[in-house]
């Protein structure tokens, strides 16, 4: 009975998994999982003489009829979902280690409202096949990608590997130290490398920036208000500003200073909170513009960051209040955008980002509401 009472806990956990985008298609000896994702008609080309499979040396380890058998088991996704088939393959001809080998097919046809690479299916399939792993080195090949597809596909991959998790887990799971590494390679419609490497390296930089932004925004959006107070969020903004260097400046107006500077609405709504409201201003100046902003266009982006909206607390059921923390998601998109623009080395814009953060419940409301949000 003693072990049972401590078998599960609700503890916040930050994942240490990493996602890297690379143009190096070779497998390393410590690869544990190999995934090829694409439409079935694209994956069928893996068995051609000049495909990436031959370059990787996998074809010398496995008869071609095995690939044909695996591909024949894939569906064309007529129901809008994906399908998969798995086996074990030697990692390289120089090692006796085996890796899990997966073929994941995407829908052949999509509606005019959906992206032709079906990003939502990519996310769902990776969640079921990869994201539950605690450790390992995963090689992920996405086939049938055009240069304009890199960003949405990268976002789909990022959503499958969240940085933050506060779901109930066993004590043993919480003690595990995640060490999952995902290397992502993009392939053409013919399952080959991209020939214009200089252009494609720019696409990889875009993928890195999008992935970092999506995972950070999801992490902040998933955190409970008991953890992500206005103070904690401001600390996150300061950390990012410091990380980005001299091209980004940071300033904030906090608490009663908002009232003095006539930000009455912002101050009035949050003044009774345990953590004071604040207005955060981050300014990005492209390095090439020097000290003057006149040489480039000025863009202002404003985001509303209500850390938790207690409106209707006394009349809504507890299940109706849980989602009220998502009033803060708007500021996260602005916050990660400044990093993405910096990563992509944008030189054309002088960017001003204003992040407004409110923390709405007082001390007694905070204690009451935490039961709904944290399971306390």
Image (cartoon, rainbow, N blue to C red):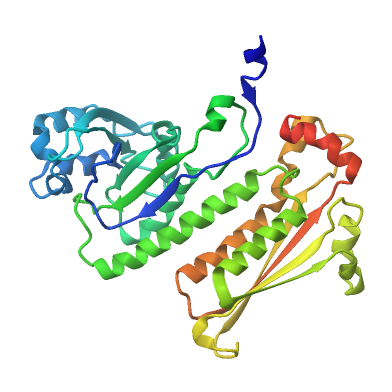
Specify whether residue 114 is in view: no
Tell me which corner region of the image, top left, top right, bottom left or bottom right, holds residue 67. top left
- Identify the residue at the far front of this view: 2
Give percent across and percent down for residue 55: 13, 49
Image coordinates of residue 62 in percent, x first then y, are 12, 33
Could you tell whether 78 is left or right of 230 in the image? Answer: left
In the rendered view, tell whether residue 193 sits above or below residue 226.
below
Q: Quadrant of residue 334?
A: bottom right
| Image side of residue 68 versus residue 147, left or right | left
Q: Residue 88: percent from the left, percent from the top?
A: 23, 29
Residue at horizontal 88%, vertical 74%?
261
Q: Is residue 343 left or right of residue 89?
A: right
Compared with 358, 317 (above or below) is above
The residue under the point 34% across, 38% down is 107
Q: x, y (%) of residue 372? A: 77, 32
Q: Quadrant of the N terminus?
A: top right
Query: On screen, 105 above or below 329?
Result: above
């Amino acid at each position: 009975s003693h072990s049972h009472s401590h078998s599960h806990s609700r503890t916040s956990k930050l994942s240490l998994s990493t996602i890297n985008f690379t143009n190096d298609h070779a497998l390393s000896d410590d690869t544990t999982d190999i995934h090829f994702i694409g439409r079935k008609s694209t994956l069928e080309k893996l068995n051609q003489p000049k495909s990436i499979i031959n370059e990787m040396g996998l074809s010398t380890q496995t008869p071609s009829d095995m690939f044909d058998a695996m591909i024949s088991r894939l569906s064309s996704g007529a129901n809008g979902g994906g399908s998969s088939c798995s086996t074990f393959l030697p990692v390289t001809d120089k090692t006796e280690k085996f890796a899990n080998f997966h073929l994941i097919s995407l829908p052949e046809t999509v509606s005019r409202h959906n992206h032709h690479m079906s990003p939502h299916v990519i996310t769902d399939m990776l969640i079921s096949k990869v994201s539950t792993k605690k450790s390992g080195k995963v090689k992920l090949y996405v086939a049938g990608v055009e240069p304009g597809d890199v960003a949405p596909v990268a976002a789909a991959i990022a959503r499958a590997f969240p940085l933050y998790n506060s779901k109930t887990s066993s004590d043993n799971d919480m003690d595990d130290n995640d060490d999952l590494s995902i290397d992502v390679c993009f392939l053409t419609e013919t399952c080959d490398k991209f020939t214009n490497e200089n252009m494609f390296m720019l696409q990889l930089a875009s993928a890195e920036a999008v992935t970092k932004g999506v995972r950070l925004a999801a992490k902040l959006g998933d955190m409970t208000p008991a953890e992500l107070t206005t103070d904690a969020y401001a600390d996150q903004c300061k950390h990012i500003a410091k990380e980005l260097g001299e091209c980004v400046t940071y300033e904030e107006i906090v608490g009663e200073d908002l009232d003095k500077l006539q930000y009455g609405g912002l101050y009035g709504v949050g003044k009774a909170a345990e953590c004071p409201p604040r207005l955060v201003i981050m300014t990005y100046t492209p390095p090439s513009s020097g000290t003057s902003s006149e040489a480039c266009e000025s863009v202002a982006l404003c985001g509303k960051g209500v850390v938790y909206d207690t409106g209707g607390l006394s009349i809504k059921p507890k299940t109706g209040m849980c989602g009220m923390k998502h009033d803060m998601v708007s500021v996260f998109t602005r916050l990660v955008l400044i990093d993405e623009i910096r990563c992509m080395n944008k030189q054309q814009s002088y960017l001003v980002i204003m992040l407004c953060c409110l923390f709405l419940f007082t001390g007694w409301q905070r204690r009451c509401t935490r039961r709904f949000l944290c399971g306390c």
